[in-house]
Image (cartoon, rainbow, N blue to C red):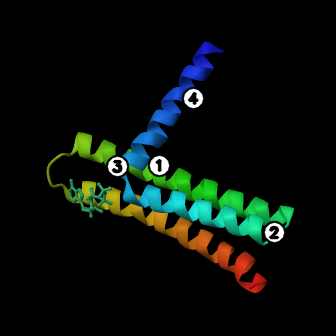
């Protein structure tokens, strides 16, 4: 049990680090708050909540993995390296695709309600 709680502590440390150092992560947290606020205000259905929660989780998870990859690349390849650049670009592209997907889902759910 103690080990489990310690594990949660490390995970929260990771979230705190990402929100302290990554502007994009903070922007995504803000988008999450806006989406939850709109969902509550517009009384969206259970199925719609499932989509919104899935989008929030996938965007934040992808952003955290992107941050981890950036740190790892900087650690193993501090100098200029074309491959290091490609790794960061591909990782950033994963975040972009997830964010676009989330924006489309948000538009499908929220726009008709206005
Ligand atoms: N070691 C490197 N070698 C070659 N190109 C790199 C290297 N590091 C970064 N790049 C290039 O610069 C871009 C921006 O890298 P950077 O590390 O600044 O990422 P970022 O997304 O701006 O992250 P952050 O600002 O959160 O640290 C990368 O996507 C990549 O194209």
Q: Position of residue 81 (x, y in %)?
A: 18, 55
The answer to whether marks 1 and 2 mark residues whose Cβ atoms lie closer than 8 Å is: no
Looking at the rendered image, the disc whose residue lies closer to the viewer, 1 or 3, is 3
CA separation in Å, label 3 and label 2: 33 Å
Left or right: 16 as drawn, with respect to 42: left
Q: Secondary structure at mark 4?
A: helix
Residue found at x 51% / y 54%:
62
CA separation in Å, label 1 and label 3: 11 Å
Q: Which residue, given by chain and number where applicable, does mark 4 sit on? A: 8
Q: Residues within 10 Å of mark 2 (few under 14, many from 20)?
A: some
**Sequence-earlier tag: 1 or 3:** 3
The residue lying furthest to the left in this view is 79
Q: Which residue, given by chain and number where applicable, does mark 1 sit on? A: 64
Q: Position of residue 55 (x, y in %)?
A: 64, 61
CA separation in Å, label 1 and label 2: 28 Å
Left or right: 66 as drawn, with respect to 40: left
Q: Which residue, given by chain and number where applicable, does mark 3 sit on? A: 21
**Viewer-nearest residue: 58 or 8:** 8
Looking at the rendered image, the disc whose residue lies closer to the viewer, 1 or 2, is 2
- Disc 2 beta carbon < 8 A from ligand 1? no
**Sequence-earlier tag: 2 or 4:** 4
Q: Eyeballing the image, is 46 above or below 1?
A: below
Q: Residues within 10 Å of mark 3 (few under 14, many from 20)?
A: few
The answer to whether marks 2 and 4 mark residues whose Cβ atoms lie closer than 8 Å is: no
Occupied quadrant, residue 92 = bottom left
Looking at the rendered image, the disc whose residue lies closer to the viewer, 2 or 4, is 2
**Ligand 1 shown in quarter:** bottom left
CA separation in Å, label 2 and label 4: 31 Å
Q: Secondary structure at mark 1?
A: helix
């Amino acid at each position: 049990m103690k080990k489990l709680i310690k594990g949660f502590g490390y995970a929260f440390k990771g979230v705190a680090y990402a929100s302290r150092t990554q502007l994009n992560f903070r922007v995504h947290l803000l988008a999450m708050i806006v989406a939850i606020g709109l969902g509550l205000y517009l009384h969206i259905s259970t199925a719609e909540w499932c989509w919104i929660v899935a989008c929030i989780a996938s965007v934040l998870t992808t952003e955290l993995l992107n941050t981890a990859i950036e740190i790892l690349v900087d650690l193993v390849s501090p100098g200029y390296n074309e491959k290091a650049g490609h790794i960061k670009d591909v990782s950033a592209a994963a975040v972009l695709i997830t964010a676009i997907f989330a924006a489309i889902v948000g538009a499908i759910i929220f726009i008709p309600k206005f």
